[in-house]
Image (cartoon, helix red, strand yellow):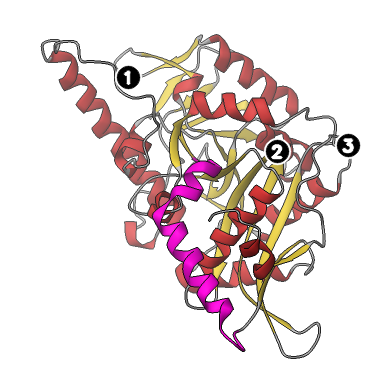
């Protein structure tokens, strides 16, 4: 659905909904990203109807004020139904200036468009934002890092936002989530599943001759990305974290003038020979200031994925990260985050926490060091630290 854009130059268009697709393509043949886009649009329509029915009901008697505790559960319907889908204006070229314009208009709350029914829409009611421009512009590493710094969770799409046709290569799809998965260390330590995993690990490592494990950060070259990429291609036929995405993150990480660090986390089983280790799980994430964010992960055997996540939580806590941002938060698809003790934060509350702990963007010099490139830590050390007991 296309509607006139009131916030940009006259004559431009804003698109409400997700990137369009060819209507003759069977749903089952679409990529997982496009299928999610369609489900999100359907959920948004359903949520709008629900709100309309609620407005027709008589006002309920005032209830006592509820606890300020954030919930640990949100359905995918409620998650995707909170916002409109995609905002796209072809005059908004990929640049930090365009991002700053977008953020200022979002903060002002000025209506930028309207629905077919005449209801006004502000930028803050959208979820996805695509910038126009050349391949080099949309993948510029400084802009990528700035999006992360401002709280966007960038994924990718292979659909042209204007025409709806399939792109030759996926492009960035920045998402300002309606809700975020936030893991605080007190909730992490209290989570039953975490405590169960830690008990099992301590018992396992106490056994004579049991395998030893280590976590590593940025010390295996591109091996983490290659394992992650192959895992997702084998599992679902595609990987939203493309090679270009990964290379852009690397360029941002290597730019010493900005506050952005990429983290390739590996869980390795040590062999009998010195220096011999086998990769069995891992993930790729990033940090801005004292906030670590997980992007995508993999596991190559058994319970390695859960063990890696729990021990990574101990490692991040040991390094004094303020909290762990785990990205998307809806269940049942992402219920493992609830098992780790996460809470579901509305966008506004998450951004307030991010702003408090991220530092300055144009400076990589802070008192906080966090995970260091090439660093490695054994499970024995993490489990003996007393954290999580």
- Which stretch appears magenta? 182-210
- Check disc 1: other Cα within 10 Å, few if <14, some if 14-19, many if 20+: few
Image side of residue 268 versus residue 85, left or right: right
Is 316 magenta? The answer is no
Nearest to N terminus: mark 3 or mark 1: 1
Residue found at the very far left of the displayed protein: 58
Nearest to N terminus: mark 1 or mark 2: 1
Secondary structure beneath dot 2 equals loop
Q: Picture coordinates of residue 86 (x, y %)?
A: 47, 33
Q: CA distance from mark 3 to mark 1?
A: 45 Å
From the image, give the main secondary structure of the stretch colored magenta.
helix
Q: Is residue 71 above or below residue 30?
A: above
Q: Which mark is residue 116?
A: 1
- Residue underneath mark 3: 257
Is 206 magenta? The answer is yes
Q: Residue at x 40, y 34 (%)?
A: 17
Asked which quadrant contains residue 215, the reply is: bottom right
Q: Picture coordinates of residue 158 (x, y %)?
A: 54, 51
Decide which of 223, 138 is in the foreground and name it.
Answer: 223
- Residue underneath mark 2: 290
Image quarter (top left, top right, bottom left or bottom right) of the N terminus: top left
Image side of residue 235 versus residue 383, left or right: left
Q: Residue at x 59, y 50 (%)?
A: 294
Q: Is residue 129 above or below residue 154?
A: above
The reply to whether callout 1 and callout 2 are in contact (CB within 8 Å) is: no
Instruction: Report if residue 89 is visible in the image.
Output: no
Q: CA distance from mark 2 to mark 3?
A: 17 Å
- Check disc 2: other Cα within 10 Å, few if <14, some if 14-19, many if 20+: many
């Amino acid at each position: 659905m296309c509607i006139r854009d009131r916030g940009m130059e006259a004559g431009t268009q804003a698109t409400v909904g997700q990137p369009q697709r060819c209507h003759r393509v069977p749903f089952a043949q679409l990529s997982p990203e496009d299928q999610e886009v369609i489900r999100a649009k359907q959920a948004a329509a359903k949520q709008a109807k629900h709100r309309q029915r609620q407005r027709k009901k008589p006002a309920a008697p005032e209830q006592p004020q509820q606890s300020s505790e954030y919930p640990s559960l949100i359905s995918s319907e409620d998650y995707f139904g909170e916002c409109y889908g995609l905002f796209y204006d072809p005059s908004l070229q990929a640049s930090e200036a365009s991002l700053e314009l977008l953020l200022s208009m979002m903060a002002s709350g000025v209506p930028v468009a309207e629905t077919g029914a005449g209801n006004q829409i502000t930028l803050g009611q959208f979820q996805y934002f695509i910038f126009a421009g050349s391949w080099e512009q949309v993948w510029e590493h400084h802009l990528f890092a700035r999006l992360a710094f401002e709280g966007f969770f960038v994924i990718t799409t292979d659909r042209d936002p204007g025409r709806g046709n399939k792109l030759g290569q996926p492009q960035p799809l920045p998402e300002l989530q309606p809700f975020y998965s936030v893991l605080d260390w007190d909730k992490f330590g209290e989570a039953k599943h975490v405590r169960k995993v830690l008990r099992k690990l301590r018992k396992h490592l106490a056994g004579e001759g049991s395998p030893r494990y280590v976590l590593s950060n940025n010390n295996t070259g591109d091996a983490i990305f290659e394992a992650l990429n192959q895992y997702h291609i084998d599992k679902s036929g595609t990987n939203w974290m493309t090679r270009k995405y990964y290379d852009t993150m690397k360029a941002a990480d290597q730019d010493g003038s900005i506050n952005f660090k990429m983290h390739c986390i590996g869980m390795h089983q040590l062999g009998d020979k010195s220096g011999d280790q086998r990769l069995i799980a891992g993930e790729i994430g990033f940090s801005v200031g004292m906030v670590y964010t997980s992007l995508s992960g993999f596991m190559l055997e058994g319970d390695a994925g859960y063990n890696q996540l729990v021990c990574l939580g101990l490692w991040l806590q040991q390094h004094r990260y303020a909290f762990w941002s785990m990205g998307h938060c809806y269940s049942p698809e992402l219920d493992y985050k609830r098992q780790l003790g996460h809470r579901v934060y509305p966008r506004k509350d998450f951004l307030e926490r991010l702003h408090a702990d991220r530092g300055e963007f144009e400076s990589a010099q802070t008192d906080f060091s966090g995970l260091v490139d090439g660093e490695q830590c054994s499970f024995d050390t993490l489990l003996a630290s007393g954290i999580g007991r």
